[in-house]
Image (cartoon, grey):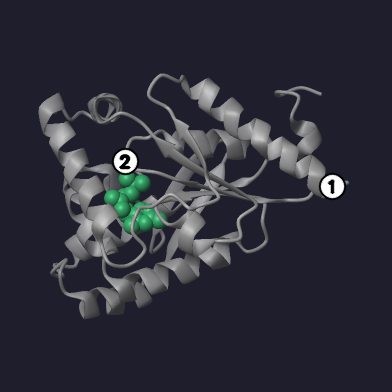
Amino acid sequence: MKDNGFEAYKGMRKIIIAIDGPAGSGKSTTARLVAQKLGYTYIDTGAMYRALTLKVIESNVDPNDEDSIVKLAENTRIDLIYENGNLKVILDNRDVSDKIRTPEVTSLVSVVSAHPKVRDIMVKKQRELGKDGGVVIDGRDIGTVVFPNADLKIFMTADVKERAKRRQKELKAQGFEIEIEKLIKEIEERDEFDSNREISPLKKADDAIEIDTTNLTIEEQVELVLKKAYELINQNSN
Ligand code: DC
């Protein structure tokens, strides 16, 4: 059996793995790799909110105008294509995988995603995508709201300086050079906003396992989540 020895888990009962946490905690990278190892689908709900935010910007809609964003969202198609460990984000049949990661989208996504009626639409789409299991889904409210009955819930955290460093590296790879102090401030503001909004705030579910990734490598984070996943998959298969 080539690959990583985990091929054996493909074809067994498919569970739902919810990974929540603040910006830069390592949840997306971990979720993507865990999905790849298990042969599961990866659903990046942050990417869905980012795609909608891009559409808001391109349509010249005011990010504070909830009703107009609802109308836009109702007429928007967002597809997540997960293949060979890579995620493609398709907005109305256009690949926007890179465009949704720009600082402009990042600075507005918290405002767009805080509108309750907008969240209703997005949560519905997310539940539909994950309903058959065999998914790793990451975001802010997955374990608390989207899939409160998820088989495995992980809440990832990390020191804000470490998170800013990771973000700086990601942005550099995209051609944006941004000072670390600015990123720390932005991350703190976004966490504050996401954690204090009225509906579905960023919050650890009571039954989530917390993983602090400050001093962990990506491989270590992935291993921790996989270990928990195997325990559950084995239990559920007996
Ligand atoms: O994970 P991310 O940084 O790509 O998410 C971008 C924003 O989307 C985040 O600041 C808050 C919002 N978001 C949300 O409100 N609920 C989710 N389930 C996922 C993301």
Q: Which residue is at 48% across, 33% downward? A: 211
Q: In the image, residue 103 lies at what x, y percent?
A: 18, 42
| Residue 12 visible in the displayed image | no
Pointer 2 residue: 23
Report the side of 144 relative to 149 (left or right).
Answer: left
Q: In the image, residue 133 lies at what x, y percent?
A: 66, 56
Q: Which residue is at 60% across, 55% downward? A: 150
Pointer 1 residue: 237
**Residue type indicated by callout 1:** Ser
Q: Distance between the residues labelled 2 and 1?
A: 34 Å
State the residue in front, 48 or 220. Answer: 220
Q: In the image, residue 154 lies at what x, y percent?
A: 52, 43
Figure quadrant of residue 58: bottom left
| Residue 195 visible in the displayed image | yes
Q: Which residue is at 17% across, 30% downward? A: 176
How many marks the image carries: the answer is: 2
Q: In the rendered view, would you say 128 is above or below 15?
A: below
Q: Ligand 1 closer than 8 Å to the CB at disc 2?
A: yes
- Which one is earlier in the sequence, the residue at label 2 or at label 1? 2
Q: Which residue is at 37% across, 24% downward? A: 214
Describe the element under mark 1 as helix, strand or loop.
helix
- For the N terminus, give its image quadrant: top right
Q: In the rendered view, would you say 122 is above or below 42?
A: below
